[in-house]
Amino acid sequence: MPIRKPWMLPSAESIRAIPAVVGVYEIADAEGNLLYIGQAGGREPFGLRSRMQLHFGGDDPNPVLRQHAAQFRWEANQQYTTKRLEMLMQFQRDHGGPDGGDWPPAHPTGDWRDRPQLGRLRRSQHSG
């Protein structure tokens, strides 16, 4: 479920090359540790490009991203809200310990838009 593209370094050229489409994205630190899972919807004037300009333009309101964001990857996706929730559930399953519940470090505490109620992602068990 995570984005399968390679990480990209932020630059004016790499951000300008992103098409004005809706979709999801991931931001990581220099070591590749995932910091944030985001989405760009129809309200963004230039979709994913607008979101990357916000995060890497020096004015990001998120202090974790301002200090540690070093690379990104994105995926155009018309079902961006559902895809982002699936990516967050995958992160919790893979990084949440036995009880789940961990979030990427740049997701603000208490912000319901960035901390939605998620189900648990589990492998199906076959009865046989």
Image (cartoon, rainbow, N blue to C red):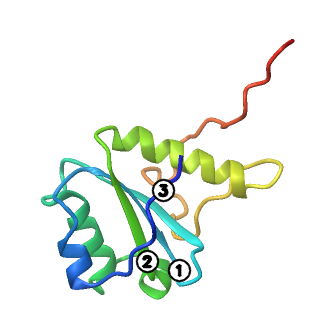
Q: Position of residue 116 (x, y in %)?
A: 51, 45
Kindly identify the residue that appears in the image at 60 percent across and 45 percent down: 89
Labelled disc at residue 19: none
Q: Amino acid at mark 2?
A: Gln
Whether the residues at callouts 3 and 2 have beta carbons within 8 Å, the answer is: no
Residue 44, quarter of picture: bottom left
Q: Is residue 101 above or below residue 35?
A: above
- Above or below: residue 51 compared with residue 120: below
**Element assignment for label 1:** loop
Q: Which mark is residue 4?
A: 3
Comparing 110 with 126, the one in front is: 126
Say above or below: 82 vs 42: above
Disc 1 target residue? 29
Circle 2 sits in a helix, a strand or a loop, which is it?
strand
Please identify the quadrant where the C terminus is shown: top right
Is mark 1 in CB contact (under 8 Å) with mark 2? yes
Q: Earlier in the sequence, mark 3 or mark 2?
A: 3
